[in-house]
Amino acid sequence: MKDFGVGTTNPAKVSAIQKAIGPEAVIHPVEAESGVSAQPFSDEETIRGAVNRARSSIGTFHAGIGLEGGVVDTTSGLYLCNWGALVDADGREFVAGGARILLPEEIAYNLRGGGELGPLMDAYTKREGVRHREGAVGVFTNGLVTREAMFIHVVKLLIGQWEYDGRNRDKRGNI
Ligand SMILES: O=P(O)(O)OP(=O)(O)OP(=O)(O)OC[C@H]1O[C@@H](n2cnc3c(O)ncnc32)[C@H](O)[C@@H]1O
Ligand SMILES: [Mg+2]
């Protein structure tokens, strides 16, 4: 049985991690500092946030996992971006990216003006706590891909890379 520190208490993220790793894993949510701005505005900054969260949540557990949402400005508009990081007790680090979709111009305009996606999504949907539920990705994909489903994929990419590296390390050790 493995223990994982996770650098968030957001239920959409915590539940994604539990579902991706399986019921036998013990998940320990920790209020971790992302060390980046509340609304990351590039892949680089969003990755840094995910890695910082992973590093500061590992504690004495087998591994720490950090998930971070951000946006990326491109010549074809402002996209949602999502990144995850896993750091293990040996200091190995893995990074994986999640879905990206174009945000409506109204939301993009407010983000460029310094707004944060969480509150903007609540105002847009006239609901509260969208970021804890289906997220922006869920709203704009008509509920087909929720924030949880999107992060499940990211966490599987992390765990899969970690397992693959571990297997190959064992093989190398046996040569
Ligand atoms: O409690 P934490 O783990 O910080 O969860 P969070 O929802 O704040 O998520 P992030 O810090 O990773 O996201 C950075 C910002 O983007 C917002 N955000 C990211 N993805 C979102 C989504 O799918 N729906 C709504 N807001 C989102 C979020 O509210 C923050 O302002
Ligand atoms: Mg946050």
Image: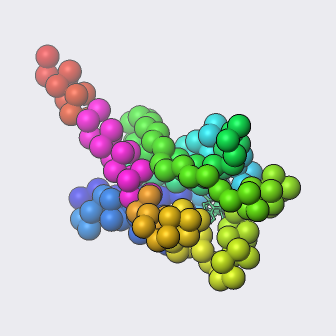
Image coordinates of residue 59 in percent, x first then y, are 48, 53
Rendered image quadrant of residue 8:
bottom right
From the image, which quarter does the C terminus lie in?
A: top left
Q: Is residue 108 visible?
A: yes
Residue closer to the observer: 105 or 82 = 105
Residue at the (22%, 28%) spot, across then down: 168
User: Does the magenta portion include 170?
Assistant: no
From the image, which quarter does the N terminus lie in?
A: bottom left
User: Does the magenta portion include 153?
Assistant: yes
Residue closer to the observer: 99 or 33 = 99
Residue at the (74%, 51%) spot, across then down: 37
The residue segment tinted magenta is 151-165
Residue at the (58%, 42%) spot, across then down: 47
The image shows residue 133, relative to residue 175, as above or below, that is below
The image shows residue 82, relative to residue 146, as above or below, that is above
- Dominant SS of magenta comes to helix
Image coordinates of residue 45 in percent, x first then y, are 67, 41
Residue closer to the observer: 127 or 175 = 127
Q: Is residue 93 left or right of residue 62?
A: right
Residue closer to the observer: 119 or 102 = 102
Residue at the far left: name it: 174
